[in-house]
Amino acid sequence: MTVGDLLRGAWAALRVPRWLDADRLPLLLAIPELPDVRSVTEPSAETIRAARGILRRLERLPGGRWRGTCLYRSAAEVLLRRAAGQPARLQLGVHSAGEEVGAHAWVECDGRPVGPDAAEADRYTALRPQG
């Protein structure tokens, strides 16, 4: 893992709580209108791993606003992918088994789940925004 991976991962992880506030969350859930980018890149697996590791450490801070949940991990990944020019969006889903209800968050690009949390997506019914 390079210093660049750590810096990009930290940049995304530190910004997540602000993006999960009620006024900005709809922007993560929407398909973004990205500028015409000539070279769309893929954030490295190391950068995504760095963001996840930093979130795990930040959640240990007393009174902190960070969590190591799929919602926070996916929000950080959306920020990284959008910075790379990808049309990433945060997707939320639910499933029920008897009386138990579960929820999950993952990242979608072009309508397909991507990234480390994508493998679980097929077990959930995606929630679609109203309007």
Image (cartoon, rainbow, N blue to C red):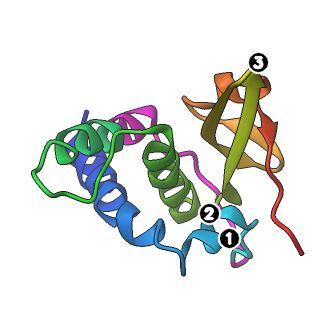
**Residue contact at pointers 2 and 1, CB within 8 angstroms:** yes
Task: Identify the residue at image location x=69%, y=49%.
Answer: 91
Q: Disc 3 on helix, strand or loop?
A: loop
Vertical comparison of 89 with 25: above or below: above
Q: Which residue is mark 1?
A: 37
Q: Between residue 75 and residue 94, name the one nearer to us.
A: 94
What amino acid does circle 3 point to? Gly
Q: Which residue is mark 3?
A: 98
- Which is nearer the N-term, disc 2 or disc 3? 2
Task: Identify the residue at image location x=27%, y=36%.
Answer: 53
Q: Disc 2 on helix, strand or loop?
A: loop
What amino acid does circle 1 point to? Val
Name the quadrant containing residue 15.
bottom left
The C terminus: image quadrant: bottom right
**Residue contact at pointers 1 and 3, CB within 8 angstroms:** no
Residues packed near mark 1 inside 10 Å, few (<14), some (14 to 19) or many (20 plus): few
The residue mark sitting in front, 1 or 3, is 3
In space, the residues marked 2 and 1 are separated at their CA atoms by 6 Å
The outermost residue toward the front is 99
Vertical comparison of 128 with 69: above or below: below
Residues packed near mark 3 inside 10 Å, few (<14), some (14 to 19) or many (20 plus): few
Q: Between residue 88 and residue 105, name the one nearer to us.
A: 105
Q: Which residue is mark 2?
A: 85
Name the quadrant containing residue 88.
bottom right
Residue 17 at x, y percent in the picture:
36, 64
